[in-house]
Amino acid sequence: MKKVFERPKSLKPAPFRYCPGCGHSLIHRVMAECIDELGIREKTIGIAPVGCAVFAYDYFNFDMLEVAHGRPPAAATGMKRVLPDRIIFSYQGDGDLAAIGTAEIIHAAARGENITVIFVNNATYGMTGGQMAPTTILGQKTTTTRKGRDAAGFGYPLQISEMLANIDGVSLVARTSVDTPQHLMKTKAMIKKAFLYQIENKGFSLIEVLSQCPTDWWLSPEDSIKWMQEKMIPTFKLGVFKDRNQVQSG
């Protein structure tokens, strides 16, 4: 019988312990496939911070580094400059990258650091109890916005991809999702492109991936997908916000 499916070598033979319906496992899978297809597993180093993203080191079958909350871009900068032949990526959640790590991500982008950032946006602080995050959408209920986020008291959700696309040092910024098989395949294609840009020394790339958090959204896995499609994607529009190659060729 022809084998049509197998575990990527870049994933350890360990069961995921993410909550049912969480998007992290899907993102791990397509990232591992990209790394295998590009043949870069032996020289890839991943960096993860505090939050659900930290569990990545239990599943990726290559070198992983855990750093302080919000600091992956700073650590990635140092590592890439010392080891320029390695493929360095950070794997960060929205509570990490868009809150305590805002300065790190903005200035790494401004410097045009030749790193790849995978930014998982589930609009909540997943690990610490479902508090409001910088990406929590208006009207969304969290443990710290019991009546829903309102702009007057809590401001507006940060549009990280749109912000970074305006920085000259950025080569590639895109926002994708994992709510459908088609969007998952688009996510894989953009992550692979981001890794290729680093291999080709094109500078800073960030792929924002909208992901479900059924536990902290207080929804079933099925309903969390519907909520993402009806509420989250209209707020965080999918697409490519900057691609230096397309700009140059146009």
Image (cartoon, rainbow, N blue to C red):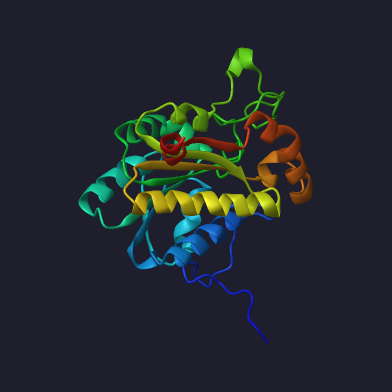
On the image, the x and y values in percent for residue 249 come to: 44, 38
Q: Could you say which is closer to the camera, residue 152 or residue 196?
A: 196
On the image, the x and y values in percent for residue 41 come to: 39, 66
Residue 60, above or below 93: below
Most distant residue in the top direction: 152
Residue 21 visible in this rendered orientation of the protein: no
Q: How many dots with numbers? A: 0
Most distant residue in the bottom direction: 1
On the image, the x and y values in percent for residue 204 come to: 37, 41
Q: Residue at x 59, y 57 (%)?
A: 25
On the image, the x and y values in percent for residue 169 come to: 34, 33
Residue 1, above or below 204: below
Q: Residue at x 36, y 47 (%)?
A: 67
Q: Could you say which is closer to the camera, residue 54 or residue 167?
A: 167
**Residue 131 location, quadrant:** top right
Q: Residue at x 55, y 59 (%)?
A: 30
**Residue 45 location, quadrant:** bottom left
Which quadrant holds the N terminus?
Answer: bottom right
Q: Residue at x 65, y 28 (%)?
A: 137
Most distant residue in the left direction: 82
Most distant residue in the front direction: 250
**Residue 69 location, quadrant:** top left
Residue 3 visible in this rendered orientation of the protein: yes
Taking the image as shown, residue 179 lies to the left or right of residue 205, namely right
Q: Could you say which is closer to the camera, residue 30 or residue 94?
A: 30
Taking the image as shown, residue 44 lies to the left or right of residue 150, namely left
Q: Could you say which is closer to the camera, residue 205 or residue 179?
A: 205
Taking the image as shown, residue 137 lies to the left or right of residue 64, namely right
